[in-house]
Image: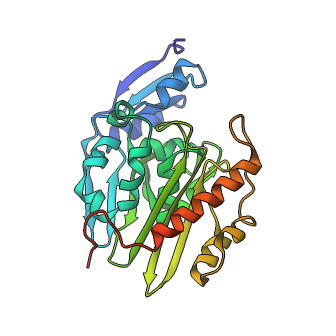
Amino acid sequence: MKPAPFGYAKAKSLDHAIALLAEHADCRLLAGGQSLMATLNMRLSAPALLIDINALDDLGRISLDGDTLEIGALVRHAGAERSPEISRHAPLIALALPHIAHPAIRNRGTIGGSIAFADPAAELPACLLALGGEVAITNATGTRRVAADDFFTGLFETALGTGDILTAIHLPAARADSRYGFAELARRHGDYALVGLAASARAEGKHLKDVRLAFFGIDATPVRAHGAEAALERGEDAVAALARDLEPDGDIQVSAAAKRHLAGVLLGRVAKQLGEPRQLGEPRP
């Protein structure tokens, strides 16, 4: 299939991109295009104008500011995989990246594009939620930050509004007591996950504190399992508590009952990972 006719504009700067968004109501931003091109070709999306933001080099940077790691929206998945900053300061992201699609897609796909598209079976939105990160959103009035817990609002829906551009994500940098876990189940490596889990916690002696469990492939958005989080912190049966946290919807691949079972299997695996010291890079002092 071929896309419907559309116009094309290449943004020369972030201000230029924002101006183009304000001028054209029926438009879409083009970054990596790995999801957008598919929806265009299937005519699930038919904007009058594509605004190409690939020339905005400032959005392709990774930097550490105190205890916060900033990852620009245009950082490619492949670039993030090779980044020593991400390996050292955001190891959960490093764990998840190899599970995203295939190398050809990771060469073009962007961190910001994945977060903004908000596919409920995608890895990075769940990682952002598990880390308690924030999304930087810029428009004509300035830049605001939205917590991950408030950013994903529905199926492929986010806090991004008309005229908004996702410019970066901000993550708390890993410390010596940080613990992370990641696991997913898919029919084939590179497929969207049937069920997945991203997790973070803080080690306090033999106990876990500040546990955040973010499941994906379960609901219309990545979802936290608050009961299981509390059970892990108390050293209780987190899998039993999980049954009260999740209400998965079945789909053409997996029934709701199977998803609930698989979520418990993944929780068991990830709970073991959370009890282990970090293995990617050296912890921050």
The front one of 32 and 184 is: 184
Is 13 drawn above or below residue 123 in the view shown? above
Image quarter hosting the C terminus: bottom left
Image quarter hosting the N terminus: top right
Which of the 4 image quadrants contains residue 121? top right
Where in the figure is residue 244, as x and y percent of width and height?
75, 66
Question: Count of labels shown?
Answer: 0
The front one of 4 and 202 is: 202
Is 107 drawn above or below residue 284 in the view shown? above
Where in the figure is residue 4, as x and y percent of width and height?
54, 14
Residue under the image location 35 percent in, 62 percent down: 90
Is 221 drawn above or below residue 102 in the view shown? below
Residue under the image location 40 percent in, 30 percent down: 51
Where in the figure is residue 82, as x and y percent of width and height?
25, 48
Where in the figure is residue 150, as x and y percent of width and height?
58, 60
User: Colour scheme of this structure image?
Assistant: rainbow
Q: In the figure, is residue 58 to the left or right of 8?
A: left
Is 56 drawn above or below residue 34 in the view shown? below
Residue under the image location 44 percent in, 26 percent down: 50
The front one of 69 and 181 is: 181
Judge whether residue 156 can be spotted in this image.
yes
Which of the 4 image quadrants contains residue 247? bottom right
Outermost residue toward the bottom? 205
Judge whether residue 76 can be spotted in this image.
no
The front one of 98 and 53 is: 98
